[in-house]
Image: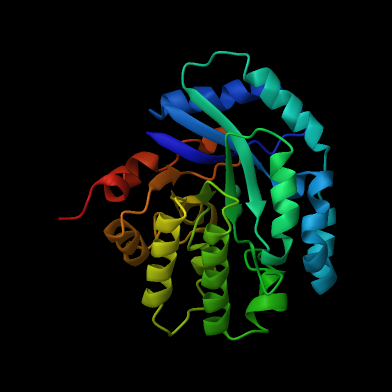
Amino acid sequence: MIDAHIHLEAENYTLEYLNAYIRQALDMGIDEIHVLEHTHHFKEWLPLYEDAINEAPETKQWLLQHDMIHIQRYYDFISFARTQSFPITVKFGLEVCYFPQKEAFIKTMLEDFDFDFAIGSIHYVYLRPYDLKGISEKILWNVYPTNDIYEEYYHLVIQSAASDLFTQIGHPDTIKMFTDYKPDIDLTALYQELAETLVSHHVIAENNVGCHYRYGHPDMGMSDTLLNILKEHHVMLTTSSDAHKPAHVGMHIKDIQEKTFLQNK
Ligand SMILES: [Zn+2]
Ligand SMILES: [Zn+2]
């Protein structure tokens, strides 16, 4: 079993800290983990967010309230960890917030270091974060029609998959997390276009359960509708917890194993 999206969220990287993730993975029966950091964790990635920062003061305040560190500290830790041996496979990468106008910047930044993988995730729609309780309602959900937000979200997911910048697309339907706002349009055509794009660009899609246990969404991972369309198109799939601390590594991976990997009859 694989957990392909785990946040370290570290200020100080130590082997003890990484080992806590590995111990939990072993306890949960996981053979392979992909650890990463959000790009907003690093000072050098701040230019990625300049348009979002200019778009809404709330976003600026939220982004800058976190202490950012120099990415060299993460690189150095990865280089050190790669000299160690672990009882399971451990890979290192980044979760990149995708903005179409920043593709050149993302490309340069990703070329700077030899990561094992790069996940592209949509966290902003119309340059506004959709997943921040208390902020997103005010600057996004109560401003734009819900149907438009959903359509724009899937356009961005499709663009991220087509960008050839990423090996994997993070949580491809987390736009659903604010359950008070529901679209009343049929998303099937967008799901199909996403599936075709993932296949033609050889990008993996995540069945990510973060939405379920971190935000209380009833779906454990992707919606069955989206998952089935991805499976019909033979999209490469993986499973992930979106853990932000050791205790969440491997969370629900066992529960979604069968529906993610067993082909439907
Ligand atoms: Zn994410
Ligand atoms: Zn994440």
Give the residue at x 47% y 51%.
203
Indicate the position of residue 56 as horizontal and vertical percent values: 81, 72
Q: Quadrant of residue 245?
A: top right
* Residue farthest toward the left in the current orientation of the protein: 265
- The answer to whether residue 67 is visible is no
Q: How is the image coloured?
A: rainbow
Q: Quadrant of the C terminus?
A: bottom left
Q: Is residue 9 above or below residue 47?
A: above
Question: Relative to the observer, which residue lies in front, 5 or 194?
Answer: 194
Question: Relative to the observer, which residue lies in front, 145 or 199?
Answer: 199
Left or right relative to 150: residue 192:
left
Give the residue at x 81% y 49%.
66
Q: Quadrant of residue 234?
A: bottom left
Give the residue at x 52% y 78%.
151
Indicate the position of residue 77 as horizontal and vertical percent values: 72, 24
Give the residue at x 39% y 41%.
253
Q: Is residue 118 above or below residue 180?
A: above
Question: Relative to the observer, which residue lies in front, 110 or 247?
Answer: 110
